[in-house]
C-alpha cells in the first residue's frame, strides 16, 4: 500500500494505491481542504490530523511526497512549505521516512514525459486506471501520480 501526497495549504491531494503482481489499483483518492476563514495554525493542525488519520487507516508501507515547486507567488510557496513541513513532521512522528519526488519525477512516472502538463497527467491516469473520467481535482490527480511514482520506485531492483 502506497500513500501519495501532493502538499498544499488550502487543498492537499492524497491517494492510496496498491500493487499486486504488477497490477496497480487505486484504493482511494481525494483532497484535504482547509478553510481560508480558519486561523493559520488551525489549518496546519487540520492537515496534521488528516494525514495522521490516513496513515492510521491505510497503514501504508510507503509514503511518497512531492517536493515543493517554487512558484512566482511567494505567499503561496511559503504556505505550501509550511504544510509540507507539517506533513513531514506527522510522518516522522509515525516513524515513517517518506520518499520525496520532484514534480518532474512525478510527471515522468505518470506520463513518460517530465514536462507534461496537468491535463496530460490526468488523461494518462484515466487511461492507465481505466477511469470513466480523468481524476479531479488536479491536486488529487497529482497525488495519484505521486503514489504511482512511489510504487515505481519501490519496485525497482
Image (spheres, rainbow, N blue to C red):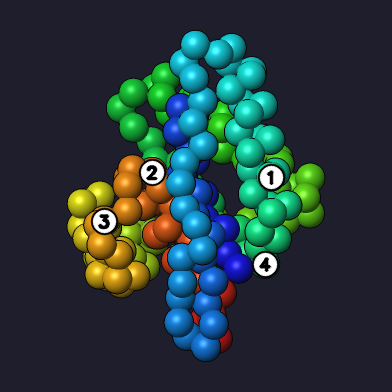
Whichever of callouts 4 and 3 sits on the residue coming sooner in the sequence is: 4
Pointer 1 residue: 53
| Quadrant location of the N terminus in the rendered image | bottom right
Distance from Cα at disc 3 to Cα at disc 1: 26 Å
Residue 139, labelled with which disc? 2
Q: Would you place residue 24 above or below residue 36 in this image? A: below
Could you tell whether 134 is left or right of 61 in the image? left
Whichever of callouts 4 and 1 sits on the residue coming sooner in the sequence is: 1
Whichever of callouts 3 and 2 sits on the residue coming sooner in the sequence is: 3
Whichever of callouts 4 and 2 sits on the residue coming sooner in the sequence is: 4
Q: Nearer the viewer, mark 3 or mark 2?
A: 3
Q: Would you place residue 61 above or below residue 133 in this image? A: below
State the residue at coordinates (53%, 60%).
16
Distance from Cα at disc 3 to Cα at disc 2: 12 Å
Q: Nearer the viewer, residue 131 or 41?
A: 131
Pointer 3 residue: 134
Pointer 4 residue: 61
Q: Would you place residue 74 above or below residue 93 in this image? A: above
Q: Secondary structure at mark 3?
A: loop
Amino acid at each position: 500500500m502506497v500513500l501519495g501526497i501532493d502538499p498544499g495549504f488550502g487543498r492537499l491531494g492524497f491517494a492510496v494505491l496498491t500493487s499486486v503482481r504488477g497490477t496497480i489499483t487505486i484504493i482511494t483518492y481525494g483532497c484535504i481542504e482547509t478553510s481560508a476563514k480558519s486561523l493559520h495554525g488551525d489549518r496546519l493542525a487540520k492537515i496534521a490530523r488528516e494525514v495522521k488519520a490516513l496513515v492510521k487507516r491505510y497503514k501504508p508501507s510507503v509514503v511518497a511526497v512531492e517536493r515543493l515547486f517554487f512558484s512566482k507567488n511567494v505567499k503561496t510557496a511559503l504556505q505550501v512549505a509550511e504544510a509540507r513541513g507539517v506533513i513531514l513532521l506527522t510522518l516522522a512522528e509515525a516513524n515513517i521516512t517518506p520518499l520525496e519526488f520532484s514534480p518532474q519525477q512525478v510527471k515522468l512516472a505518470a506520463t513518460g514525459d517530465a514536462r507534461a502538463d496537468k491535463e496530460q497527467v490526468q488523461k494518462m491516469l484515466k487511461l492507465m486506471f481505466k477511469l470513466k473520467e480523468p481524476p479531479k481535482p488536479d491536486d488529487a490527480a497529482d497525488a495519484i501520480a505521486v503514489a504511482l511514482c512511489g510504487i515505481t520506485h519501490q519496485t525497482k531492483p
